[in-house]
Amino acid sequence: MSNTLQAIRGMNDILPEQTPVWQFVENTLRDVLQNYGFREIRMPVLEKTELFKRSIGEVTDIVEKEMYTFTDRNGDSLTLRPEGTAGCVRACIQHSLINRQTQRLWYTGPMFRHERPQQGRYRQFFQIGVEVFGLEGPDIDAEMLMMTARLWRRLGLKQVSLQVNSLGTADVRANYREALVAYLDTVYQQLDEDSQRRLKTNPLRILDSKNTAVQALLEGAPVLADFLDEESRTHFRALCEQLDLARIDYIVNPRLVRGLDYYGRTVFEWVTDQLGAQGTVCAGGRYDVLVEYLGGRATPAIGFALGLERLIALLEKQGVETPDTSPHLYVVTVGEQAQQQGMVLSEHLRDALPGLRLVTHCGGGSFKSQFKKADRSGAHYALVLGDDEVQRRVAGIKPLRDREEQQTVSFDELNSRLADLFGLQLN
Ligand code: ATP
Ligand code: MG
């Protein structure tokens, strides 16, 4: 193995055994997003480095130490996107999608961050991102949360809980920052190195510290809620009321802040205690200043991103059943005529039964070796065809997964028999 090439640490291959659950999640998410009138947008994976520096903020973990940045052949500094919001806002401004218009958008794809790889934390990971432009909320804030709650229901996920908070306006955060710094200065010696550094650069981020000793110190810290302006307070109250009406459980977590600088007012996270330290599966909030900051017309906005690896790990942990994707049928043919007619018949079946998953054996060999391959394919039944069957215009249907008897069915009845057997619609 040592001589063969390996994938980059923290960047995973997703193998054929794993893709069915990915497809289940992606398809379900796409459905639900469509149900709510969201449209897909696709952006490049590479952007100019400046975009992320300006939008995410110079003194965040991502920009300070996690970006994959390089100089291309023209001498331009480019970065593999660490998240999707910046690129989405850039695209909306560039193509004038948000001049006095509401946009409900989503995207999916890989994101890149140079973090320490561990369970639930990778260097390439997949997100589904959702952004709404042009609505001030709190109705849309509530709808975003109702939509995510529906996602969990549709996926069959349990035990994800919602935490919400309001970060208020920029002035509120500036006042709060002062009070927080004053408090943390009194316990400076007990802070870890990271927090000591952040105290100078980005003190609010200390609230997000994963260090339990730091978290304990924060118990005594002033809370942002006490500094909120009246408008943010009203906004937050309306959001909570709407969630109550929709019977969505949530916890107000006064220490919830987001890792990126552009958030204000509503922020939220969906968390689980079933994935160890990497328990946040979905996170987002309002970023009303970003569009203008990146050169667009002032536009309120809210969004969230869902981490697909964590979501899938949770589905697997909870043993959620995903749709069967193994072949219904594996066509076994022995004899020259049977082999030719088998291919013709397979195409007819695909025409007649659009939902049919059918593998036609290729490569010849004995019945025995073909059945072995049929079995290994995971197929539920084999369709058996020899030259003799072709003459009589019949095929054998042999169960591969249980002890039912093999049946012989005439070509004329085959379509309807298979439709019954697999619960499929005839074309
Ligand atoms: P964390 O606090 O766990 O580092 P974050 O605040 O950096 O998360 P966001 O930038 O808000 O995360 O990204 C949204 C979601 O994307 C996260 O809640 C998580 O599910 C997922 N995510 C973020 N970073 C990673 C990663 N390195 N590997 C896998 N998933 C990730
Ligand atoms: Mg992070």
Image (cartoon, helix red, strand yellow):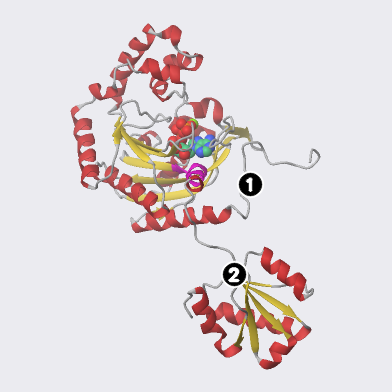
Q: Which residue lies furthest to the bottom in this view?
A: 392
Query: Which residue is disc 2 drawn over?
Result: 402
Q: Is residue 416 above or below residue 358?
A: below
Q: Quadrant of residue 85?
A: top left
Cβ of mark 2 under 8 Å from ligand 1: the answer is: no
Residue 311 magenta-drawn?
yes
Quadrant into which the N terminus falls: top right
Reply yes or no: does residue 310 show up in magenta.
Answer: yes
- Residue 251 in percent (x, y) is at 30, 34
- Kindly identify the amino acid type of the residue bearing the numbered disc 2: Asp
Callouts 2 and 1 close, C-beta under 8 Å: no
**What mark, if any, has residue 371 been given in the picture?**
none
- Residue span colored magenta: 306-314
- The kind of residue on which mark 1 rests is Asp
Image vertical order of residue 229 relative to residue 362, above or below: above
Please identify the dominant SS of the magenta region: helix
